[in-house]
Structures are given as C-alpha cells and as structure tokens.
Image (cartoon, grey):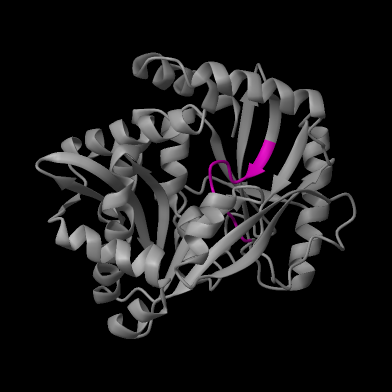
Amino acid sequence: MKLFTLDPVHDGRWHRLVERHSRASIFHTPGWLAALQSTYGYEPVVYTNAPETEELESGLVFCRIDSRLTGRRLVSLPFSDHCEPLVHTHDDWKVIVSSLLERATSEGCRYLEMRPLSGSELSLEDVSGMAKYRSFYLHTLDISSEPGELFQSFHRKAVQHAIKRAQREGLTLEEGRSPDLIRQFYRLLIRTRRRHAVPPQSLKWFENLVDCLGRQITLRVASKGGKPMASILTISFRGTVYYKYGCTDERFHNLGGLQFLLWEAIKSEKEHGAQLLDMGRSDLEQMGLLSFKDRWASSRSVLTYYRHPAECQSGSRQWAQRVVGYALARLPDSLLSAVGGLLYPHMG
C-alpha cells in the first residue's frame, strides 16, 4: 500500500480528524505537536492512506527525531503518555503499520515506537515486527458524579484529611497561565526533580505549551503567607482533564498542598464539562506515586509501549543511570536546568 504523509501542525485535515475521532487525545492536537516542534526541533508527521486531495479517515502521528547522540527514530509520541492510532478500520490499522515498518527501515531509523492505550481493539500483538518494549501504569478517574459523592470516594486520611488540612491552614490558590505562575511552577519543579535525581525539562517547554495550547492549559499554585508550596499543570481537551505535572516543596508536604490543588482542579474542570481525569503514567516500581494515585479511587490499567525492533535496557545502563542521578541531585538549580535543556532533545 502507498503511504502518504502530511504536516499535522498546519494541515487542516488532521485538525478535523482529531476533532471528530473518538480516540483522539490532547497529545494528537496541533498545539501539543507544535510545542514539541518548537522546543525540541522534532518534525511531526502523519502517515495515512489518504492522498492529499482526500479528507482523512485514518492517520498515525509520529515525531521524526534525528539526534547525533541517540540516532534517528520515529516515536508516537515523545513526552506523551499515550497516543492512540486514529484509524477507521482494523484493516487500515494493520496495513498502515506494516507499510510504516518498511518505511522506517528504509529511512535508517534505529527503531519505531508506538504508545497505544491498553484495551484497544487495535492491538499491536498481531502486527509482525512489533514487540513489547516497556510497560507502565495509567490512572484515570471518572469525575462525572456529584462533588460530595466524589469526595467521599477518596482515601479518608491520605486525601480527604489532607484537603481539609490545607483548607484549615488557609492555603491560597492562584490559577492561570501568566509568566509569573510559570516561574513559580518551574521553581517547584526543579526542587521536585532534584529529589528524584532527574533533570527538569526546560522552562522553554512550559512556555511553549502555554503559547501553543493557550486556554487549554491551567497552572495552579498553592501558597501560604505568599510562599508557593505546591503547583500542578493540567490540560483540558474534549471532556478530559490531563494532570500532566505536579511539584511541591517537600518541607510543607504535611499541609496537603498537592491534594488541595488537584481537588480544586477537579471541581473547576467539572464546571466546564470534564468527565474524566487522566492522571498520567507511572513507572511500575514507583510505589509512592502509585499509592498517591490509587488513593483517589482511580482506575489503574497497564500501558504498554511497543518498538520495532525491540530493545532491552541492560543492567549496566541502569547502573549508569543511578550514578548520573546521584550527581544530578547535587547540581545547583541553574546547572540542573541547563542539563535538562541539553539532554531532553535526545531523550524523546
């Protein structure tokens, strides 16, 4: 089958497909793709069986990444928790993927990676050449019920009591997408990533998200006495709110700032029609994060990424990452942020 390509940031056919397709998420939108392109230089591309004279019924979106450090590859999509194929039929799905594997090989890609949601009837298990690469947990929460009923479903001590503690302590909430809020959020993000021995993504990434997604992005900051203690970034798209980033000052965890912010976000987004909270992916071994998400009475599913060809992470590579993590945790803020700015374009 002949494959056609298009630019999903500027071709209106992709925007129209995303708007009407039931599997589309925020990660398919031209705004999200434009932020990836502006920040990291990735080239967004859609592969389809429709020539340029026809409206789209099916399409698979990728980013072409060409790094001197990590090689050339196709990823659907970098820095995105999941990315469903937007196809019309199962036959379209299998034919497009099979043709795309041949294209990736001919273009000299080290690998092609896809991140479909679990439970999809569009399984990669029966596509020759694709193999499981890595698995995560994905948490989602149905927020369609009344606020009082929803609140009572949360873990009594870890969530309900934390929210009430934040309210008693008089934590204040500021929300929006102003440059000042972005800076407050980013300072807390650096602090959080340092604790986890991981460099933060660049400040430019978050500025570009706001520029490209506009009112779909909301930053919320919880403070006491004018001192920011916790912040979250959420993105809304067609009835779903995505809890994409959360960060805190660990010295004030006992005040319940993060729980307070997430609850305020849920209530606010419900008023604007949101029915589902996507809490994002978690590594299988991140027991603290898994416990935090479980206590919101959310549903946990397995999220599996696929590659062609499959690659495994060696023990020596894991050891090297631990050593690098130890060093990163001790860098000053400016250098830690600079390291993230240098590394992330090669990590997508």
Q: Residue at x 79, y 41 (%)?
A: 103
Specify whether 150 is left or right of 294: left
Q: Foreground residue, 340 or 148? A: 148
Task: Give yes or no for residue 253 being in the magenta stretch.
Answer: no
Residue 243: percent from left, percent from top:
41, 56
Image quarter where the N terminus lies is: bottom right
Q: Which residues are magenta?
A: 74-84
In the displayed structure, 304 sits above or below 152; it is above
Task: Give yes or no for residue 77 being in the magenta stretch.
Answer: yes
Residue 157: percent from left, percent from top:
38, 67
Q: Quadrant of residue 322?
A: top right
Residue 335: percent from left, percent from top:
40, 14
Q: Residue at x 51, y 19 (%)?
A: 328
Image quarter where the C terminus lies is: top right
Q: Foreground residue, 206 or 263? A: 263
Residue that extends furthest to the right in the rendered view of this protein: 128
